[in-house]
Image (cartoon, rainbow, N blue to C red):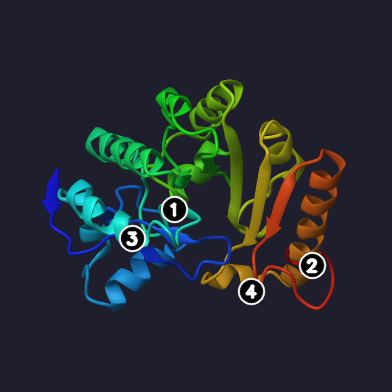
Amino acid sequence: MNTIKRQSLLYKTDVEYGDYTINHVLGCSHGCKYPCYAMQMAKRFGKVKTYEEWCEPKLAENSLEILDNEIPKLKGKIKSVQLCFTTDPFMYGYDEVSDMSIKIIKKLNDNGIKCSVLTKGILPASLANFSKENEYGITLVSLSEDFRAIMEPHTAPFQERIAALRAIHNLGCKTWVSIEPYPTPNIIEQDFDDILNAIGFVDKIIFGRMHYNKKVTEYGDHKQFFNDLANHVVEYCKKHNKEYHIKSKTVTNQGAKND
């Protein structure tokens, strides 16, 4: 795997449900085609030039050394650290990335800092050995492997993701699911309740609509469609005593309100 060196890692994020974040990999092998907002921004700011380059990730080899310098300076300001917002901490098929992510989580936890993890890969059972304040999540917008092959071509199969999440949930970890970016029926016809039932064991659900895709706006009732689904998530979570968050710009005009 190719590597890079970074000057800094921890930074305050503008993502609405985030605090601090760390992105210790440039690029992502998963190659999502929703399109991927992280890839768009990387191309815009000259970090990568092509989709193919984005899909050849580069690991920040000096991540742990940087953290040794940054944690003492930022420790008093950090409530939690998200792994990750512009890459994947448990990138499917890249053990080097997963190993570094585990070392990063351990170092942050050893300094009393909570971690929140989100992946389209496989969450290892060893995460249960870390702080019980940590939260571990997967992205899941469908159960269709045909859809995954088109839109998330190099990610972990959906059922493998769910099984790994359930395993660490059963070991006492806090778990969550990000149902984002959720597609409209003209992209894929599916039963939303099937997804909710598949992840009904988790502690928290985040829901958000798909953006930056022309097919979404071509679906005539897309605003009402997302309003209705957001309301459904809220009602489901209230009924089953789960935390929830509806992403900004998912709901328009009426319907469920954002947390």
Q: Regarding mark 3 in the picture, which secondary structure is present there?
A: loop
Query: Dot 2 corresponds to which residue?
Result: 257
| Residue at (73, 66) in percent of width and height | 258
Q: Nearer the viewer, mark 4 or mark 1?
A: 1
Nearest to viewer (mark 3 / mark 4):
3
Q: Which residue is mark 1?
A: 81
Name the residue carrying label 3. Answer: 10
Residue bearing mark 4: 217
Whole-number angstrom distance, CA of label 1 to CA of label 2: 26 Å
Mark 2 secondary-structure assignment = loop
Which of marks 4 and 2 precedes in the sequence?
4
- Closer to the N terminus: mark 1 or mark 3? 3
Mark 3 and mark 4 in contact? Answer it, CB < 8 Å: no
Amino acid type, label 2: Lys
For this view, does 118 lie left or right of residue 232? Answer: left
Q: Residue at x 27, y 58 (%)?
A: 70
Q: Earlier in the sequence, mark 4 or mark 1?
A: 1
Spot occupied by residue 27 in the image (x, y as percentages of width and height):
27, 57
- Element class at badge 1: strand
Q: Position of residue 179 (x, y in %)?
A: 62, 50
Are circles 2 and 4 on residues that touch, CB within 8 Å? no
Real-space Cα separation, disc 3 to disc 4, in angstroms: 36 Å
Residue lying at 62% horizontally and 58% vertically, measured from the top left: 183
Taking the image as shown, residue 208 lies to the left or right of residue 88, namely: right
Task: Identify the amino acid type marked 4.
Answer: Thr
